[in-house]
């Protein structure tokens, strides 16, 4: 019940295309869903996050779509650029329930120039 | 630039050595974390300190010993490690009260020979 399932494992997109990464969760107590971006040799960095009372959040080229009834959320990267090539982790947490963040398995994105 | 600073960036040690990893943050965060990350895997929680007190120990072997000398510093003491302990060790911090956002350092790459 604590798992966050993430797909696909890897993704290759042409420059200018849309990258889509999907995640699903089981625990309805989760109430904060961040996405982290990690470049090789670096630590993860918070990219964008959403709470379940919002169906969509957009920051620049990055959009999170959230479907509370389906317990699914996804990251869309519009106009994907080679500089977006990184590993993306979705995550779920319950800030009022402690300090644990449950990470998805990660998606390795490669944007072809 | 990350505001969580980790040293050293790289460490090679033998199985009988004693070494320490260090982490420092000056964001006023009162929760600090150690994560372990293996290649192509998500970060795995090891320890959490909240207000300088150990809050979570995820059943980590005693050859890993955390220490939080003050609200800005976090250490991880290493002794008698095994080759399978080779990984990227990430320090993170979060706002007082834990909003769900983690701020990661760039990590310390540990190789155990």
Image: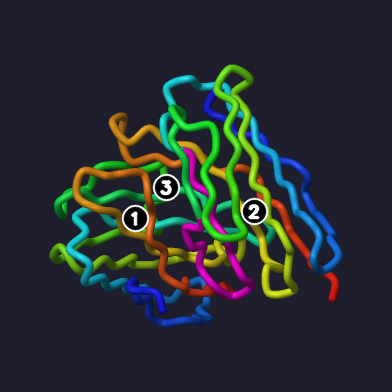
Quarter of the figure that contains the N terminus of chain B: bottom left
Chain ID at mark 3? B
**Residue drawn at (45%, 64%), measured in percent from left and top?**
B90
**Residue drawn at (51%, 49%), measured in percent from left and top?**
B44
Q: Are marks 3 and 1 in contact (CB under 8 Å)?
A: no
Measure the alpha-carbon separation of dots 2 and 3: 18 Å
Is B18 positioned to the left or the right of A62 in the image?
Answer: left
Chain ID at mark 2? B
Q: Circle 1 is placed at which residue position? A: B33
Q: Residues within 10 Å of mark 1 (few under 14, many from 20)?
A: many
Instruction: Based on the picture, tell me whether residue B71 belongs to the magenta stretch.
Output: no
Residues beneath discs 1 and 2 located on the same chain = yes
Q: Residues within 10 Å of mark 3 (few under 14, many from 20)?
A: few
Where does residue A24 sit, x and y in percent of width and height?
64, 30
Q: Residues within 10 Å of mark 2 (few under 14, many from 20)?
A: some
Taking depth in this image into account, of B42 and A9 the one nearest to the observer is: A9
């Amino acid at each position: 019940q604590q798992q966050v399932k993430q797909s696909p494992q890897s993704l290759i997109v042409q420059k200018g295309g849309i990258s889509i990464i999907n995640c699903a969760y089981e625990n309805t107590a989760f109430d904060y869903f961040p996405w982290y971006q990690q470049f090789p040799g670096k630590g993860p960095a918070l990219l964008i996050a959403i709470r379940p009372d919002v169906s969509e959040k957009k920051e620049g080229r990055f959009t999170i779509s959230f479907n509370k009834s389906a317990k699914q959320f996804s990251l869309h990267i519009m106009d994907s650029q080679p500089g977006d090539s990184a590993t993306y982790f979705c995550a779920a947490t319950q800030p009022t329930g402690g300090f644990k963040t449950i990470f998805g398995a990660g998606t390795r994105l490669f944007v072809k120039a | 630039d990350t505001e969580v600073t980790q040293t050293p960036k790289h460490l090679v040690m033998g199985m009988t050595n004693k070494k320490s990893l260090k982490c420092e943050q000056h964001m006023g965060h009162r929760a600090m974390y150690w994560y372990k990350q293996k290649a192509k895997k998500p970060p795995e929680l090891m320890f959490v300190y909240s207000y300088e007190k150990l809050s979570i120990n995820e059943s980590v072997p005693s050859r890993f010993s955390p220490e939080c000398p003050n609200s800005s510093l976090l250490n991880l003491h290493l002794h008698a490690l095994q080759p399978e302990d080779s990984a990227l060790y990430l320090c993170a911090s979060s706002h007082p009260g834990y909003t769900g956002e983690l701020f990661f350092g760039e990590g310390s790459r540990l190789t155990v020979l």
